[in-house]
Amino acid sequence: MIASRHNFTWTRITSMVPLAALVITLQCTAQAPVRKVEEQALGRLSLEMNRTYGQVRFHREEDLEDRFISSWPGADPAALPHFYLIQRAQLQALNGGAASYMPSSMPTMYVATNPEREAVYRLYGFASAEEEFSHLVKDLPIQTITGRDQAQARGLTCGEMVYGLSSEWWVDGEPGVLLQAVKHFFASGHKDALLLAGQWWRKAKGDRDVINIATVRNVDGTYLVNLPIFWAPVEGDIPPQVKAYQIKVSVDGICHMDPGLIKIVK
């Protein structure tokens, strides 16, 4: 976490349209005028989403921002984007002007705002997320990916924000695979989850080199980030799999993923 960043939670309730309440929770670091601009930009998106999801809130994802920062050493904090996870909020009560709400389920959806906070980029969960992230990067000050560590940090950010590969699913080596498998079998109601996880992994076929998070530099100067995730259906008897996604990171920090290059161990 960047020590110079101070966070607080700001909540606003307004009735901009009949019978609709807008609830936006922002953890802001900018000055008040910029916060107002960001509020208005997210507010417009919130009203648009009300038609499908009802009231929504925007949860600041500072861990993802920190990962983005690690891919851009020396960046001015004021020039960095804000990342938000959109959550559906059920307004419960007004108590002295403050809202209490309970998030309810909705598809995973991310957005980002630019440093001026007037533009909203629609990332995972929206159409053209990869293109929107490219627009975001191009609208930021010029940045250069100069090594594998920076490229990997950028690729992992894209994995979650652009392609919806939650960090809760990531694995990095055999211990991580086995741990996820044990959790899966326990969640499926098996008391012998440890035994079943070991049996499944011994029988699994595929290139086991892909079960590690790794980054290589291509001959054209781009980088390829290998991001393996543990995949298993919630219901049914389909065995678990490890799917390794290949995320290309260009020197200017833009990401691209070819779905046809997914490698599978099962």
Image: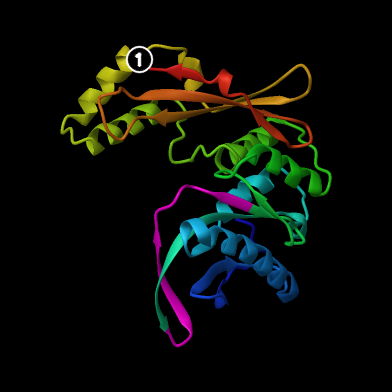
- The residue lying toward the viewer, choosing from 57 and 1, is 57
Q: Is residue 152 left or right of residue 184?
A: right
- The residue lying toward the viewer, choosing from 116 and 105, is 105
Q: Is residue 29 visible?
A: no
Q: Is residue 139 left or right of residue 166?
A: right
Placement of 222 over or under 114, stated as above or below: above
Q: Is residue 251 visible?
A: yes
Q: Is residue 107 magenta?
A: yes
The residue lying at 62 percent from left, 66 percent from top is 43
In this view, which residue lies farthest toward the right? 142
In this view, which residue lies farthest toward the front? 18
In this view, which residue lies farthest toward the left? 191
Where does residue 173 sit, x and y in percent of width and height?
A: 45, 25
The residue lying at 32 percent from left, 19 percent from top is 201
The residue lying at 46 percent from left, 18 percent from top is 264
Instruction: Name the element at disc 1.
Output: loop
Where does residue 254 sit, x and y in percent of width and height?
A: 73, 36
Total labels drawn: 1
The residue lying at 35 percent from left, 14 percent from top is 204
The quarter in which the N terminus is drawn is bottom right
Placement of 14 over or under 161, stated as above or below: below
Placement of 207 over or under 101, stated as above or below: above
Q: Which residues are magenta?
A: 95-111
Residue kind at label 1, given as amino acid type: Ala
**How was this image coloured?**
rainbow
Q: Is residue 180 left or right of residue 48?
A: left
Mark 1 Cα shell of 10 Å, populated few (<14), some (14-19), many (≥20): some
Q: Where does label 1 land, which residue?
A: 204
Where does residue 2 sit, x and y in percent of width and height?
A: 64, 57
Where does residue 192 sit, x and y in percent of width and height?
A: 17, 29
